[in-house]
Image (cartoon, coloured by chain):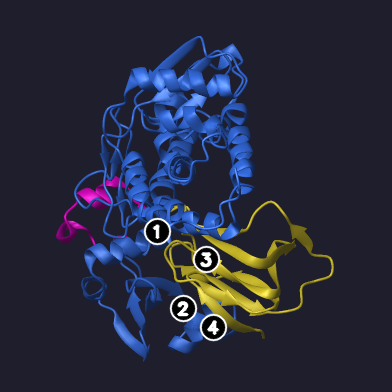
Amino acid sequence: MKEVILAQGDVYLLKVSIPAKAKLVTTTNVIAKGEATGHAHTAEGDVEIYERNGTMYLRVGPIGGTIQHQEHELVTLTPGDYEIGIVQEYDYFAEEARRVQD
Amino acid sequence: MSKINELTSAQKALLPIYCDRWMAVGLSTMPANREQAEKAINEIYLIGGLKPPTKIIWTGSPLGNALARVALQNKNLASVRNSVGISVRDSVWISVGISVRDSVWDSVRDSVRDSVRDSVWDSVRDSVRNSVGISVGISVEISVGNSVWDSVYGQHDAHWLSFYDYFRVVCGLVEETEQLQGLFLFAQSAGWALPHEKICFVSERPNICKLNEANKIHCSNGPAIAYPDGFMIYALNGVRVPGNIVMTPAEELDPRLILSEPNSEVRRELVRKIGVERFITAIDAKIIDRYEDYELLKFKMPKSNTIAVYLKMKNPSIGVYHVEGVFPNIRTVQQALEWRVKGNTWNPKQLT
């Protein structure tokens, strides 16, 4: 079991080691985006985004970084590796868990 | 010209004026100045190294631009957006960048550009763009949804144009920003443009554009954004919602709508409009656990024997309540919080 160390809306971060085969994402700093608002959680600062098997990771360098969002207050990132998670909810009509959609 | 190392007091005093001026451009609901806009379009093409379009087609909205382009697809239209927009912007970015010290750049960016961007770009332009993309995708074919990417956003480019206009007029960086003259003029004249070789589609501005006190698109009794051709967007507190949610009085909305709304942001606005206490009463929920601002609700789903468990929580950044379903066998708030993060330990040091 891993520990959620910070959360911003429906995005949360777990302290992990990034898998060696994860690939660096260079095309965007958006880690999650809302459909109804267009608002996005973005990684800023000394931060790299990685991806492996559909899971996204953040590597925060010595200068540190932040996650920003138009509606939520920013969260600050200390150096280290993190796994990015999106919270789930239970849909009682479909009778299944699903990623929160916003 | 020597590098600008700092802004004078007089220059700093003009920052809010440029912010207000370009905010007004971005949120303008005046009819387009078509003569001025067409002059600007011609100039934009020439600056981009292209011949001006032989035909300018006016439409009632950015959606109208997209649909007009669809109607002419057999003409093999070639977008020239990169030439007239992106390459010019990138060039000016470099020219101004080498003329001012980083701290000056950052100061003007933070004071002028970011303020205008929050409302005009992040709220209004994003909503129009997403709505056009969705509308075009549904009404014709998804591939032509690219019209939103091929556009010059005119008045909705106000945030980054405000930044360079300040440097041009207040700091005297005239030569460095000369290539933006057409875009400056166009932004102050019309809505969006969809530029192609020989033909350019140009839209009117909206005739309604309403924001709340947080500068998010919002209207509680009508469309938040509407264009002369009938294209409109309903929104509550920055969240685009179906029109019936806005137009139906709160007391006439069925609280059970909250349970069937799949989008969490729309659901939050339903909770805000209907009221969380009325929702709890309507579904006859029992509170089975409490922790800080959280409450765990248990109730029977309407027209069903299914027992549902929902977590009621407060968004700590905006202080608004929200509800989410959690797994049926959950009995405590702590279990619910950990189930939401897939069984990991819920112990955030920062929660916003």
Residue A95, position as x, y percentages in the image: 49, 66
The local secondary structure at tag 3 comes to: strand
Stretch in magenta: B239-257
- The secondary structure type at the circle numbered 4 is helix
Image quadrant holding the C terminus of chain B, namely: bottom left
Chain in yellow (letter): A
**Mark pair 3, 4: CA separation:** 24 Å
Q: Which residue shows up at 76% across the image and 60% down it? A: A24
Callout 1 secondary element: helix
The chain ID associated with circle 4 is: B
> What residue appears at the point 62 percent right and 30 percent down from the top-left corner?
B82
- Kind of residue at badge 2: Pro
Q: Earlier in the sequence, mark 1 or mark 2?
A: 1
Chain B shade in the render: blue
Q: Nearer the viewer, residue A66 or A97?
A: A66
> What residue is disc 4 on?
B338
Taking the spot 50% from the left edge, 21% from the top edge, the residue there is: B43
* Side of B159 where B49 appears, left or right: right
Give the distance between the C-alpha atoms of the residues marked 1 and 4, in whole angstroms. Answer: 53 Å
Residue B256 in sight from this viewpoint? no
Q: Real-space Cα distance between discs 1 and 2?
A: 62 Å
Task: Name the residue type under label 1.
Answer: Ser
Closest to the observer, B217 or A98: B217
The residue located at (32%, 48%) in the rendering is: B20
| The stretch drawn in magenta includes residue B348 | no
Look at discs 2 and 4 and give the one toward the viewer.
4
- Give the labeled residue for mark 2: B328
Q: Is residue B311 left or right of residue A7?
A: left
Question: In the rendered structure, the residue with mark 1 lies on which chain?
Answer: B
In the rendered image, residues at marks 3 and 4 fall on the same chain: no
Whether label 3 touches label 4, CB < 8 Å: no
